[in-house]
Image: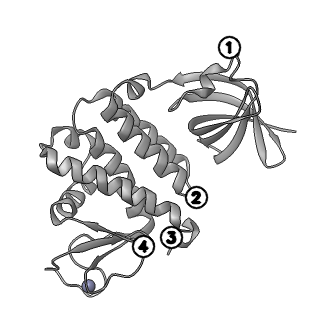
Amino acid sequence: MEEVNDRFIILKSVDVGEKNKKLSLFCEKLGKVFAIGRGVRSQKAKLKFLTLPFCVCDATLFKTGSIYLVKTAKVIHSFMALTQVQEKFDSGNIILETLLKFDNLNNIHFNKAISILEYIENVDKNEILFAFKFLIDLLYTNFNLNFSCCNICGNMKAQKLYLNFQTGELECENCIEKNVVQIKHSTVELLDKIANMDLEQIVLLNIENEIIKSIKLFLNKLIKGLIEIDLNTLKK
Ligand SMILES: [Zn+2]
């Protein structure tokens, strides 16, 4: 059996058998893997914390076939605040969902995700924009998004704009195909702005509640949409 020391964040966990959990982990070195937390649901389990969302641990993992076993683990950051405030929880969840959907993630994505979760934990405003920033950064890296016009015909004054999450392009109503979500002009402008901003600047943004609401809706649709497609086709 192969033994690895790694740091991970728990993206998702499902109950297996009476006391076990199957964990979707995003590891700093290994990337995304499945692991079993043996007995972690029993009252006196040492590794009980493996049932908590957002938990970041340093651990020793054993590889058995295509899956890992968590041998030992120590909590580095529990992100408790994220589970106690709805806005923070929703925003943190968008980060986890995003990580679940994308393949080929590396340690740069890992460290970025952790630092954005730290921001979400510590700020008391615009939490959703940090989740937005993370998703947009990923889309940027994968697709070279261009926000200034319809990416297909070049129309700069399209009435309606859509983001195609299969190709990563912004499209007008004349060019849309499948796999798109409509995106308001105000959201596109904000997207463009946020994509070029540092995290410190995002805290200071003053955004109307209505726009925040529409961003939330857009992110949820986008993430749901990502489920429908084979993410390996995303890479150009
Ligand atoms: Zn067009």
Picture quarter containing residue 121?
top left
Q: Which mark is residue 179?
A: 4
Of marks 4 and 3, the one in the foreground? 4
Residue occupying the point 38% across, 63% down: 140
The residue labelled by disc 3 is 234
Dot 3 or dot 2, earlier in sequence? 2
Amino acid under disc 3: Leu
Mark 3 vs mark 2: in front: 3
- At mark 4, the secondary structure is loop
Of badges 1 and 3, the one in the foreground is 1
Q: Select label 1 or label 2 by which is in front.
A: 1
Asked if the residue under mark 3 is in contact with the one under mark 4, i.e. CB atoms within 8 Å, the reply is no
Query: Tag 2: Cα neighbours inside 10 Å, few (<14), some, or many (≥20)?
Result: few
| Sequence-earlier tag: 4 or 3 | 4
Q: Which residue is mark 2?
A: 104
Please tell me whether mark 1 sits on a helix, a strand or a loop. Answer: loop
Could you tell me which residue is drawn at 62 percent across and 41 percent down? 25
Q: Which mark is residue 43?
A: 1
Residue at mark 2: C-beta within 8 A of ligand 1: no
Q: Earlier in the sequence, mark 1 or mark 4?
A: 1
Measured as percent of width and height from the top left, residue 218 is found at: 31, 57
User: What number is the disc on residue 142?
Assistant: none
Q: CA distance from mark 1 to mark 2?
A: 36 Å
The answer to whether 25 is drawn above or below residue 121 in the figure is below
Q: Residues within 10 Å of mark 1 (few under 14, many from 20)?
A: few
Q: Is residue 199 above or below residue 167?
A: above
Query: Does the closest atom of ligand 1 sit within 8 Å of the Cβ of label 4?
Result: no
The type of residue carrying mark 4 is Asn
At label 2, the amino acid type is: Asn
Whether residue 116 is visible here, answered yes or no, is no
